[in-house]
Image: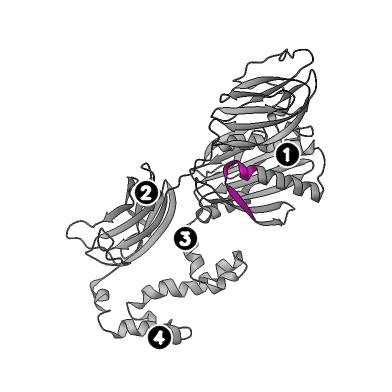
Amino acid sequence: MKKSIFFVFTLLILTVLACSFNFSTAKISEATMAKDADGAQPTTTFGQDEPFYCVVQLANAPDDTRVKAIWTAVDVEGVDPNLNLSEKEITSGDEQLNFSLANDEGKLWPTGKYKVDLYLNDKLDRTLDFQVEGAAVAAEPTPTSAPTAEPTVEPTAEPTATPEPTAEPTVEPTEEVTAEPTAEATVEPTKNAAGDLLQIPTTEPTEESKYPPLPFKEEPYVHPSKAFTFAMPESFKGIAGDKTSVSFGDDSSVVGIAFLNAGAKFSDKDMQEFIDAFTSSFMANFSDDHKILEQKTTSDGGIFQAVSYTSNDGDGDADFIFEQRDTIIFVIYFVTTAYDEMEATWHKIIESYSVDPKAALVVVPNAGDGVPSAEPTPAPKPTQPPAPAGPSIPGGKGMLTYTNRTDVDFVIDVIGPTNTSQVVPPGQTREFILDPGHYTINAHSAGGKYYVPSYEFDIAAGQLLRDGVQ
């Protein structure tokens, strides 16, 4: 019976999610700052009288792909820090997009640091930093001493002596802004990354600035059951939810939480069996193949699992955290095709995530609870009129009812002493009259794009099962 609970629990999550994962395949393969619209003259340094060009290369982009460029004066002479200069959005499936920004005629750009943030379908994809140099600074590279002195002095003498000498020439400060702070920046990343970033001190600060967490709503999300809560990104929309689960996401990522009552405290072996069954069923539902990268116990006794997967809709990664509090098993998962960009957001969600097993027990007081269709619903949903007497079961037969909680037609195949099949439209329920015995049930969308792993059940004469569970 335990195994059937596992698979039915994943069934309801998967049938909802199967039709909800619609990841965009579009990506920015390359983006370059340049002195011309075609990108033939790439640069990160502009003169005060030059327009800025940003050339973006797209891959696997449908026609409704949206790319937005936001230009910012980061640290510019005579201007407030991080001043927004302009922004523009282009909707196109073209392989190359061009953004540009020019100053008013006759005016010069102030010297200093600038950047352009590139958003793909409303999500920050990358940031390109560049700078504007004045005429005096631009003229300095002409003597060969400046360029040659920088490469040769930096490797040999700069580790101990150059910070002060190089601060005097006007060219050097631009080098020290990227080089000198990295010595300090390495201290911060090492606190969060176990020290291994000391080998590449300049990378981590850059990555952190490229992919900060998404903006979050002021108030955290609290499930109606009060069994769990977590911080919610502003851009995430509701995908599905019921009294024991919920999922939110955007076009590249989904976060979801669900719980059930196992009826007893699991041993390590039982928990591992549950994790294996859940992960296998979950990943098989929407990916062609997956690989478990890591599994470890967290500091508070939960079990973390990292998974990578391949799919025709785009490869990606998934993280799961399983934990049992009393007899309640909670699962929080995060699936994304843009893990690097979304990692900081995911970590912020994890930090805010909390559960209340006592509140969960009020909702699912019995073993196996957590599967809405497996329970005699005490109060019918608003969209479903009550049926006090229940369905009528013919003598000597059993009845299976199956409710389709997805937004596409699902084909339900029941195999056993009575072989039958029906198409169940979205949001509707169908009845199957069956001879007593042992059965296997398969569920898949019309055309076979989405499916739920098959599972088994037994039915007796006069017995009513909902979705194959008593």
Find residue 134 and report its image quarter: bottom left
Residues at circles 4 and 2 in contact by the CB criterion of under 8 Å: no
Q: Which residue is mark 1?
A: 6
Which residue sits at x=75%, y=49%? Answer: 272
Q: Please identify the quadrant where the N terminus is shown.
A: top right
The picture places residue 374, in percent across and down from the top left corner, at 72, 28
Q: Nearer the viewer, mark 1 or mark 2?
A: 1
Q: Nearer the viewer, mark 3 or mark 1?
A: 1
Which residue sits at x=36%, y=42%? Answer: 63
Q: Which residue is mark 4?
A: 153
Ranked by sequence position, the earlier of labels 2 and 3 is: 2
Ranked by sequence position, the earlier of labels 1 and 2 is: 1
The picture places residue 145, in percent across and down from the top left corner, at 30, 86
Ranked by sequence position, the earlier of labels 3 and 1 is: 1
Amino acid type assigned to the residue bearing label 2 in the image = Val
Could you give the CA–CA distance between mark 4 and mark 2, rounded to whole angstroms?
41 Å
Q: Which residue is mark 3?
A: 209
The picture places residue 283, in percent across and down from the top left corner, at 62, 45
Amino acid type assigned to the residue bearing label 1 in the image = Phe
Q: Nearer the viewer, mark 4 or mark 2?
A: 2
**Classed neighbour count for the residue bearing mark 3: other residues with Cα under 10 Å, few (<14), some (14–19), many (≥20):** few
The secondary element bearing badge 4 is classed as: helix
Ranked by sequence position, the earlier of labels 4 and 2 is: 2
Amino acid type assigned to the residue bearing label 3 in the image = Ser
Queried whether the magenta region covers residue 291, the answer comes back as yes
Could you give the CA–CA distance between mark 4 and mark 3, rounded to whole angstroms?
29 Å
Q: Please identify the quadrant where the C terminus is shown.
A: top right
Of the pair 346 and 311, the residue shown nearer to us:
311
Q: Which residue is mark 2?
A: 67
Could you give the CA–CA distance between mark 1 and mark 2, rounded to whole angstroms?
42 Å
Q: How is the image coloured?
A: one colour
Q: Nearer the viewer, mark 2 or mark 3?
A: 2
